[in-house]
Structures are given as C-alpha cells and as structure tokens.
Image (cartoon, rainbow, N blue to C red):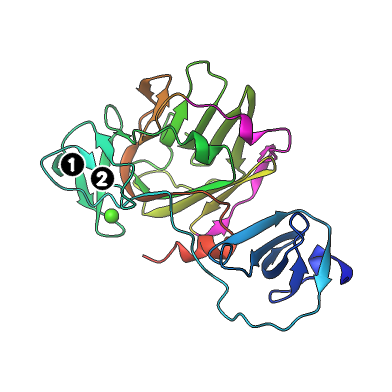
Amino acid sequence: MGQMIKARNLSVGDFIRSPQKRKRILVVETVGSEIFARGLDKKDIDRHIFLGKEDMVEKVTDVITETSVIDMPTPVAYWKMDDNTDNTVVKDEMGTYNGTAQRNTNLMSADGIRGRALRFNGSSDYVDTGETFQTIFRNSFSVSLWVKPDEGQPLINMYWVGNRDDSAYNRFGIRQVFDGTIGVAYESNNIYKFTQSESVNFSSGQEKWHNVVVVAVADMQMYIYFDGQKVDLKAKYDGDLSSMTFADFTMDQTLFLGARNLGGSDSLHYEGLMDSVGIFDCALSPLQVKSLQKK
Ligand SMILES: [Ca+2]
C-alpha cells in the first residue's frame, strides 16, 4: 500500500494507483486539484486518463521510466477541409465520416491555417457529417476546430458544429456567441447546461485564425480552450455537468459543421473560414490541447 496524498501535492512523473481500476498509472499533468494520468500497459499507453477532481489518491513509490508524456490520441473524425474540387465531398481523413457540403467545395475553398480551408457564407452553407456521434457524445469527448470569422462579434449566435434531436431533449453545439464569447450547449435526456467563456474571445470586425477546443468530461465538467489556453467560464454557465448523465444522450440528427442541425433543419449558420475540425473520443488534457496549436 502506498501513502495517501492530496492531488495538489502530486507532481508530473509521480506514480499513483488508479482509483477505479486499481492500476498503477503515471501522473502526466496536474491542474489545481485535477489530475491527468496515463496507464502504463499497452492498452492505455496512447491516451491520458482524466482522473477528475479526486482529492485523495494513493501514491505509489516507483521509478520514472517515461520521458515523453504527450501522446495524442487518434481522432474519431478529422476533416482537413483541403477539399477543393468539383463535388460536395468533405473528406474525413480517418476514412469513416466523409461530409457533404451544400455546394461544390471549389466554390468554398480558401487559404487555411493548414493548407486550404472552407468558407461558410452565413446563410446556406453547412457540411453534413452524416453521423449523429451519439456514441461519442455519450462519453468523455473533445472537439477541436480552427475558425476565422468574418465578424468577431456578429449580431446573432452562429454555430460551428451542432445537432439537436427531434424531441428537443438532447443537443450538442459549439457556437460563436453574438458578443464575441464562445458557448457550448450540451443536453442529455432533457437536462440542459450551457457553458460560456467569461471574457470576450473575438474582437469586433474581421478576425484572424483562432483555435477552439471543447473538452467534455462525462458527468463532470465542460471546458473551453481558446488558442491553447483554458478560458475562465461565467459563474452562471460554469460548465459544471455533475447533474448530467452522458450515457442518456440520445441523438437522431446528424452533426453539421458550419450550422446547427435543429431537428433536421439547418439554422444559425456560421460566416467565415473553418479548418481542421477533429472529434476525439476522450477528454484531452491541457498539454494535449496545447499540442494542437501547431500550425
Ligand atoms: Ca486545411
């Protein structure tokens, strides 16, 4: 048996015992009282495990053998948005979820943050991913995207990604709020929580490229990152999802990029450029989010 220790007294490189699985794991990041750790067997080696806000864990005396602690998980879907051809296909690099644009991609293509990007016209453009991502949104997940809005503080809310089911009891969406903040809508089985950045992220007028990452820790917490930094959240919309059961999330509508799929209809269209959209089936750690900033 190791010694019981408060989470905040742990350091990167410490070994602890996983509270759930009783496995020996390596601490790779600590943020306040939050611990990110990683398993050491082959099955777990490619991802960080978010241990949540455990106050007490069991510290294991051991020798550090790992040097590199940032491994990026493979995305479930990744749209490079380099598409620039005479058809509507928006290719998923992972090979499963090719999207469908509303017009040929050579009419939308523009200079991107990585290669080409897609321009969304704010009125009719969107990409239908053809997938609800219900399975992904029922567990911890993350979404990363690059955006360059035509107007940093539009008069209406605009969705970068979003779907909402027919019953209006389930939804997921990331939006550029009219005042230049970032908002995340998540509703599971009629329990709705909105998460919003405390301070303005986007300036009025034509904006530059920015990276937005949303990290959802199932039944616990929603985080928003802007250009690699975790943002403070409004007191009223603080991302506390402890009243939620992610496993109840039930979705019958496909996820749209560049608008929200509201029960089968596109609405709240985004105006501007978008590039490199990735969906992950785990909660990315702060270091992993930072590594997404590479252009
Ligand atoms: Ca691109």
Q: Quadrant of the C terminus?
A: bottom left
Of residues 278 and 59, the one nearer the viewer is: 59
Q: Are marks 2 and 1 in contact (CB under 8 Å)?
A: yes
Please give the name of the residue rendered at 56% of the width and 59% of the height, measured from the top-left corner: 229
Q: In this view, does 43 lie to the left or right of 97?
A: right
Q: Residue 19's quadrant in the figure?
A: bottom right
Distance (Cα) linking label 2 and label 1: 7 Å
Q: Which of marks 2 and 1 is nearer the N terminus?
A: 1
- SS at badge 1: helix
Q: Where is residue 263 in the image (x, y as percent from the top left)?
A: 43, 19
From the viewer's perspective, tell me whether residue 14 is left or right of residue 258: right
**In which quadrant of the rendered view does residue 132 lie?**
top left
> Magenta residues, as a range?
228-251
- The residue under label 1 is 105
Q: Name the residue under label 2.
A: 118
Image quarter in which the N terminus is found: bottom right
Q: What element carries label 2?
A: strand
User: In the picture, residue 200 is in which quadrant?
Assistant: top right
Q: Which of 94 and 231 is in front in this view?
A: 94
Residue 163 vs 98, above or below: the answer is: above
* Mark 2 Cβ and ligand 1 under 8 Å apart: no
The furthest residue to the left: 86
- Residue at 47% over, 17% down: 166
The kind of residue on which mark 2 rests is Leu
The residue at 61%/68% (across/down) is 41
**Which labelled disc corresponds to residue 257?**
none
Say what amino acid the circle numbered 1 marks. Thr
Horizontal side, residue 18 vs residue 274: left or right:
right
Q: Does the magenta stretch include residue 250?
A: yes
- Label 1 CA crowd tier, 10 Å (few <14, some 14–19, many 20+): many
Question: Residue 110 vs residue 2: left or right?
Answer: left
